[in-house]
Amino acid sequence: MSSAAPALAVRALTCPNCGGAIEMRAAGSTVSFICPHCGSTLDATDRDLALLTRAHKAMKRPRIALGTRGTIEGTEWQAVGYMERVSEDGGWSEYLLFNPYRGYRFLVDSDDGFYLGELLDRAPEGGEDRVTLDGNRFTLDEPAYPARVTFVVGEFYWRVAVGETVDILDYSGPGGISLSAETNEQERTWTRSRRLDGGKVMLAFGIQQSARATRPPGPGSAIPGALLVAFLTVVALLIVSAAGYARRPLLASGTIDLPVDGPTRMTVITPITLTEPDALTIETRGGRLSNQWVEYDYSLVDRRTQTSYDSSAVAEYYSGGSGDDSWSEGDSSPHTALLGVPAGTYDLIVEASARNWPERGISSFGTGETITSRIRVRRGVSSMDSFWFSLFLVALWPGFLIWRAIKRKDEED
Amino acid sequence: MDAPACPNCGAPLAFRSAALPVKVCDFCRSTVIRRGPALELAGEAATVPEGVSPLQIGTTGTATGRPFELVGRVRWRWTDGAWSEWLMLFGDGSHGWLSESSSRWMMLPREGRAADVPDLVARMRGGAVKPGLRVMLDGSAYEVNDARIVTCLGSEGELPFAAPAGLEMFSVDLIGHDGRCASVQIEDIDKPAVYLGRYVALADLKPRNLRTIEGWPVPDFARA
């Protein structure tokens, strides 16, 4: 009687709405289960897994796939739930971490970095502006603000629902520790959080590097810092892109009219939705350029986190001479790849300006000519240029190693 | 340890405690009540649904310096969830509860007396026990964290009362200062069961013989 068979950690079930296979990882504690396939909410306290709200949503995948385990400061945790919340100042994500021998923790993934939170079993003492816990004083950061749940998937030990709102009070204390109180009509809960080393969290849970813009190599472009992670990401993306050339659906497009030698114009291309991390290609078609160039500045902004991934491109076309001496150069429809863009909904802010090549006649007041540029955003890496460029990037790291090895050898000699 | 035969199936009933009157037969799941030398059958206890709890009957540990062994368990449910109450049997024959809810553990090793809770009982009679209510228990201030009717889902092992599925109780959780907490369970308002203790991490109990869970190594704090 004292040594029962090992408990099964995972209970394999079927969603009563969509029939998809689901895994419950904290059976016994889990109260709400939101199906990762269809978004329906299931009552985990019911043996038959009663359907509470039926849904047929396209579910986005969290940066840390549910079920992923990671070790934080010596303790292994499994991500079992994921929610997104917004306040006036922006949004953030929270993972519910579980270890059957330790209980639950919250992993907060915000613009500001990663935080590990633990529910307190007691309320700190004091007034609204200043509270004390274990002899440490904590001061209120800002007046109470409401936060709303905008997305939820996985399992939770309480009843969760999109739209749920709580009022949050954040307090800062010594040693980078903060406290927050979340209050709704029924209860007030206190959480103690501390900042984690973001790099370690990403490594522990296998989060891909955030988007990294690639630019055409040229004299001005610096050799990327030789990051192994970036290298591996590029290798992975290269394989993916090489395998899936045909699959590069158009996500969004727009046009922008650019007066030549006129002011910079801006347009927003939206919405760009990625259900999983992927590469994006921004294609421009700058009309018929003739000894002109167009500069594009791109800012891909995550609507939820307001994180922005910046890049730029130049469309140019020059020609001259005549007969056998005629020449032309430049790429009038450059493609820009953004690699490893996390899943999310984005707005692409495009700022562009068109210029005449000075030799054609300097005019800072414009010529009256307008270039209409069409901008398309596609998923995936869309041209062989990008392929070769990716290959070039891939070669950088080994190249750097070889260069360093040769240099060392030279120094030894 | 005496081991009379189960009046239903004849299997030996290993009572660990002379003080606990109820035992759920490990073999046929009959609830057996001891009245002096006589054994009475009180129906079949429902099986506790499987979960990923690290606790099991036979888990030992130390609570406030006193060694204990888990000898029984009752699983309760309310509208928004379910939790387990594990019965801790101490060396001197006294008992307490280790409450396990949302993978948080509340150690309640000390049995209070009804005299500790006149205030609470008086308010209960008036039907005015709600979250936020402040009461005095055993000379300290506590706040009602939640108060609700709970239903038994199943039970196993040795218990101070018979807990058939469907048994209803009024359950009140209270939080004091410095991590102190209390639990009051009332089937009969004249005999409230009061237990006092505090929130703990599993490691604080220096547990041994925890349940092994597939894919999760038993943590260092639970290894001999």
Image (spheres, rainbow, N blue to C red):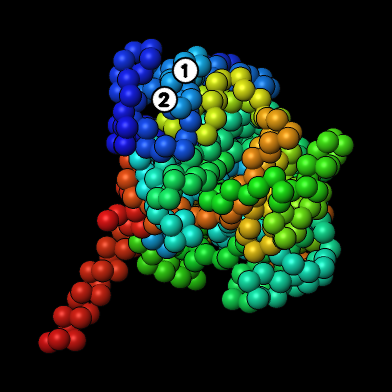
Q: Tell me where residue B100 appears, x and y as whole percent.
A: 53, 42
Label 1: state its secondary structure. Answer: strand
**Circle on res. B110:** none
Residue labelled with disc 2: B37
Which residue is pictured at 31% across the width and 28% down the height? B3
Which residue is pictured at 82% across the width and 59% down the height? A144
Q: Residue most toward the left?
A: A413
Q: Amino acid at mark 2?
A: Pro
Query: How far apart are the two marked residues, 2 and 1, measured between alpha carbons?
Result: 10 Å
Is residue A116 among the parts visible in the rendering?
yes
**Circle on res. B40:** 1
| Residue A76 located left or right of residue B185 | left
User: Residue A227 occupies which quadrant of the picture?
Assistant: bottom left
Q: Nearer the viewer, mark 2 or mark 1?
A: 2
* Labelled pair 2, 1 in contact (Cβ < 8 Å): no
Label 2: state its secondary structure. Answer: loop
- Along the line of sight, the residue nearer the viewer: A318 or A277: A277
Q: Tell me where residue B51 appears, x and y as whole percent.
A: 45, 32
At label 1, counting other C-alpha atoms closer than 10 Å, the crowd grade (few under 14, some 14-19, many 20 or more) is some
Q: Which chain letter goes with mark 2?
A: B
| Residue B94 located left or right of residue B134 | left
Q: Amino acid at mark 1?
A: Glu
Q: Is B29 located above or below residue A270 in the figure?
A: above
Q: Residue most toward the front?
A: B36
- Quarter of the picture holding the C terminus of chain A: bottom left
Q: Is A312 located above or below residue A283 in the figure?
A: below
- Along the line of sight, the residue nearer the viewer: B102 or A236: B102
Is residue A371 among the parts visible in the rendering?
no
- Along the line of sight, the residue nearer the viewer: A375 or A175: A175
- Quarter of the picture holding the N terminus of chain A: top left
Q: Is A377 located above or below residue A120 in the figure?
A: above
